[in-house]
Amino acid sequence: MSHTLQITGGAGFVGSHLTDKLMMDGHEVTVVDNFFTGRKRNVEHWIGHENFELINHDVVEPLYIEVDQIYHLASPASPPNYMYNPIKTLKTNTIGTLNMLGLAKRVGARLLLASTSEVYGDPEVHPQSEEYWGHVNPIGPRACYDEGKRVAETMCYAYMKQEGVEVRVARIFNTFGPRMHMNDGRVVSNFILQALQGEPLTVYGSGSQTRAFQYVSDLVNGLVVLMNSNVSSPVNLGNPEEHTILEFAQLIKDLVGSGSEIQFLSEAQDDPQKRKPDIKKAKLMLGWEPVVPLEEGLNKAIHYFRKELEYQANNQYIPKPKPARIKKGRTRHN
C-alpha cells in the first residue's frame, strides 16, 4: 500500500537514505528540511519526480500538510553541529517536535521520532536496554541534544495519551555510511579522513575503548519496519557488535591502503569506554537486526569520502579579481 509520507530532516544523512528507500518503494514523499546540516545534494536526484516534493522549511515554524506518516528526523545530530548552536538544537527538538505532533494530531498521521542512544547519557549499565532510564548531566556540553531528545520522547507519549496520536520511537545508536558528515569528529570519520589524506590516525588512550557502528541501510530498514509495526514503546536500533578503537584504526588503514601510521595520544576527556545497544526487543518484536558486514559498510563510506574530498578540491571557490566592465551606450543615473 502506498502512503503519503513526510520526512523532516529528509535531506540529512539518515533522512536522505530513508527518502531513497521510500521513493523506491513507490510512496509519495515530502521532504521537509531547512538545510542547517542537511544538503540539497543528498536528495537532488529525486527533484522533478512526480512522487517527490522538497520543502525548504524549519520545523520550529508550524506546517500544514496532508500526510499519513511522519518520520521526524529533523535535528543536528553530530556533536560539532549541536554544540555549535545549542539553542537552535533545543528549539528544533522541543518546539519542532511539538509542531510535528500537532500536525500528526490534526491530520491523523502516525509519527516516528528519531530519538538517540544519547538519551541513556553516560550509561552505568551495559549493554543498554530500553528499560534503562539513563544517566544524563542536564547541564553538560551535550545536554542540549540529550535532554532535547529525552523531552521529545516525553512529548510523544503525552500526545499519545492525551490526544490518541499514534507514535513510534526509535533510539538510534552510532550509524555510518555515505552522506555522513565528514567532520563530525566521530571515530570512523576521523580515521577515514586521516587515512585518505595520509595523516597519522590518532588514537586517544590505549585504543581499547570499544565502539559499535551500524551501516545506514540497516538503520533505514529498521525505521520503516518500526513505523509499520504496532510497537509504540521505544526501540533500540543499533549494532551490538563491538570493536576496539584500535581495530577500527587498523581496519580502515588497511581498506584505504594508506601508509598512515597510528599515533597514540593522551586520553580524551569524557570519552565513554563503551556504549553498546541491547537489540533483543527489535529482534523479537520487529524481526530486525543489522546484516551489513562492517568491512562492506566501511568500503562504501571510504568510497564516498574519497569522492567528497575530490568534489571539495574541484569546487573550491577562489575569488579572482574582476576586470572592470566598460559600459556601452549611455550612462545610467541612479
Image: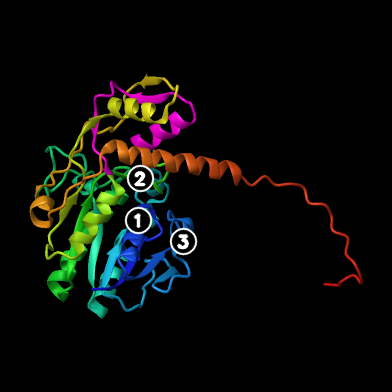
Kindly identify the residue that appears in the image at 45 percent across and 22 percent down: 259
Q: Position of residue 199 (x, y in %)?
A: 47, 25
Q: Amino acid at mark 1?
A: His
How far apart in space, not on screen, are marks 3 and 2 (Cα)?
18 Å
Q: Is residue 283 visible?
A: yes
Q: Position of residue 222 (x, y in %)?
A: 21, 55
The image position of residue 260, as x and y in percent, is 44, 22
Amino acid carrying label 3: it is His
Q: Which mark is residue 70?
A: none
* Location of residue 154 (image quadrant): bottom left
Give the structural element (helix, strand or loop) at label 2: loop
Give the residue displayed 39% in from the left and 46% down from the top: 178
Quadrant of the image for the C terminus?
bottom right
- Amino acid at pointer 2: Gly
**In which image quadrant can residue 204 be found?**
top left
Q: Is residue 147 visible?
A: no
- The quarter of the picture where the N terminus appears is bottom left
The residue under label 2 is 177
* Residue at 18% over, 70% down: 159
Question: What percent of the width, then of the height, locates residue 313?
Answer: 58, 41
Dot label at residue 17? 1
Query: Who comes first in sequence, dot 1 or dot 2?
Result: 1
Looking at the rendering, the stretch of residues picked out in magenta corresponds to 187-214
Q: Say if mark 1 contacts mark 2, CB within 8 Å.
A: yes
In the image, taking residue 271 as reference, residue 54 lies left or right, namely: right
Q: Which residue is mark 3?
A: 45
